[in-house]
Image: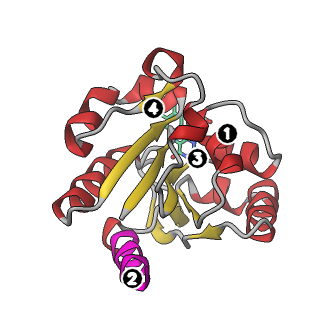
Amino acid sequence: MKVLLGVTASIAIYKALDLTRELRKRSIEVQVLMSNSAASWISPVLFEALSDSPVYAGRDHVKEAMPHISVREKADLFVIAPASADCIARAAMGRADDIITTTLLSFSGPRWFAPSMNPFMYAHKAVQKNLQILAEYGYEILDPQNGEAVCGDLGKGKMATVEQILDKIILLQNSI
Ligand SMILES: Cc1cc2nc3c(=O)[nH]c(=O)nc-3n(C[C@H](O)[C@H](O)[C@H](O)COP(=O)(O)O)c2cc1C
């Protein structure tokens, strides 16, 4: 199985490292795609080491002419975890302004978003409306958890746990 893992600049970005590691431990191929902001927060080198594969992030890291086309080859799933409010908004608008949003449009397999943000951001009508649009496009939203955000605010917005995302991927793997 091959998973495309989109990583955006949300506070839960460190959990994407864990997810990459857990997938590789199960011999699942992982191709990491990072937003430009995400790649400025955590070096793609770390994801490359954990995924054992070159990372697609910004122009400097993408050596191919059409990365958004080549990357989707043989991929079974595209999961964006964590998915920032901004990435969700761009995807809802059908934008193609980075490797993640461009690949979202060019890939036709299952596409999952794991929103991760402050509870007030998550509850905002704009974010909820954008998530509804993504659901209408057939993208799956992985329900965030209730709890305490890093800033101390309480409510729903924490990314689904790595275990929950992993279990769902394994279920999909078993069904292929
Ligand atoms: C310290 C810090 C933490 C942030 N945490 C979040 C977050 O958890 N969720 C979110 O949606 N945006 C968060 N943001 C805002 C995003 O990083 C910002 O919207 C960024 O442009 C997202 O870019 P991307 O979607 O291309 O990765 C944070 C910004 C900063 C500076």
| Residue 67 vertical placement versus 50 (above, below) | above
Secondary structure of the residue carrying numbered label 4: strand
Using the image, tell me which numbered label, if any, was put on residue 135. Answer: none
The residue identified by callout 2 is: 171
The residue identified by callout 1 is: 102
Q: Is mark 3 within 8 Å of ligand 1?
A: yes
> Any magenta on residue 174?
yes
The residue identified by callout 3 is: 84
- Determine the CA span between mark 1 and mark 3: 16 Å
Verify CB contact (< 8 Å) between mark 4 and mark 1.
no
Secondary structure of the residue carrying numbered label 1: helix
| Chain-order first, disc 4 or disc 3 | 4
The residue identified by callout 4 is: 56
Which residue does the image show at 40% across and 70% down from the upper left?
165
- Determine the CA span between mark 4 and mark 3: 18 Å
Which image quadrant for residue 29?
A: bottom left
The quadrant of the image that shows the N terminus is bottom left
| Chain-order first, disc 3 or disc 2 | 3
Which residue does the image show at 50% across and 24% down from the upper left?
64
Foreground disc of the pair 3, 2: 2
Hey, what amino acid is under mark 4? Tyr
Q: Position of residue 70 (x, y in %)?
A: 53, 39
